[in-house]
Image (cartoon, rainbow, N blue to C red):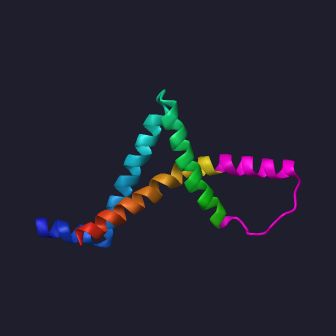
């Protein structure tokens, strides 16, 4: 029985399961801390979400350079920042969970 479990976790199914469980745990912790009154942790979570969301938006955004005024660039970066926090709230747990899943999967083999 234990051998079958090890074989499952060594395969891609185990990696997907570990990634999904890690992502759900991280997302749950993010939700709990956001609804708490611990504001430094909320700011850290927003920063992590902004980082992963910014990377995701940069992947799908065209790489053309647009000439705008300073106000245009401020509006652009403000909108991109708020979108990156919103998108990062959903993307960050899965990216972090994927890294955790890969690390656990590599240590099992």
Region in magenta: 60-83
Position of the N terminus, as image quadrant, is: bottom left
Q: Is residue 14 left or right of residue 43?
A: left
In front here: 106 or 7?
Answer: 106
Q: Tell me: residue 12, above or below residue 76.
A: below
Q: Is residue 93 left or right of residue 104?
A: right
Q: Position of residue 13 (x, y in %)?
A: 31, 68
Q: Position of residue 19 (x, y in %)?
A: 37, 60
Position of the C terminus, as image quadrant, is: bottom left
Residue drawn at x 41%, y 42% as measured from the top left: 28
Q: Position of residue 8 (x, y in %)?
A: 23, 69
Q: Is residue 73 magenta?
A: yes
Q: Tell me: residue 58, above or below residue 78.
A: below
Question: What is the magenta segment's predominant secondary structure?
Answer: helix
Q: Is residue 59 left or right of residue 105?
A: right
Residue drawn at x 41%, y 62% as measured from the top left: 98
């Amino acid at each position: 029985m234990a051998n079958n479990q090890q074989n499952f976790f060594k395969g891609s199914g185990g990696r997907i399961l570990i990634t999904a469980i890690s992502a759900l745990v991280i997302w749950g912790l993010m939700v709990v801390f956001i609804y708490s009154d611990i504001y430094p942790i909320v700011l850290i979570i927003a920063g992590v979400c902004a980082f992963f969301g910014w990377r995701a938006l940069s992947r799908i955004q065209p790489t053309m350079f647009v000439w705008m005024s300073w106000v245009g660039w401020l509006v652009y970066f403000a909108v991109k920042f708020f979108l990156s926090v919103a998108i990062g709230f959903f993307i960050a747990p899965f990216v972090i969970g994927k890294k955790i899943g890969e690390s656990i999967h590599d240590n099992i083999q």
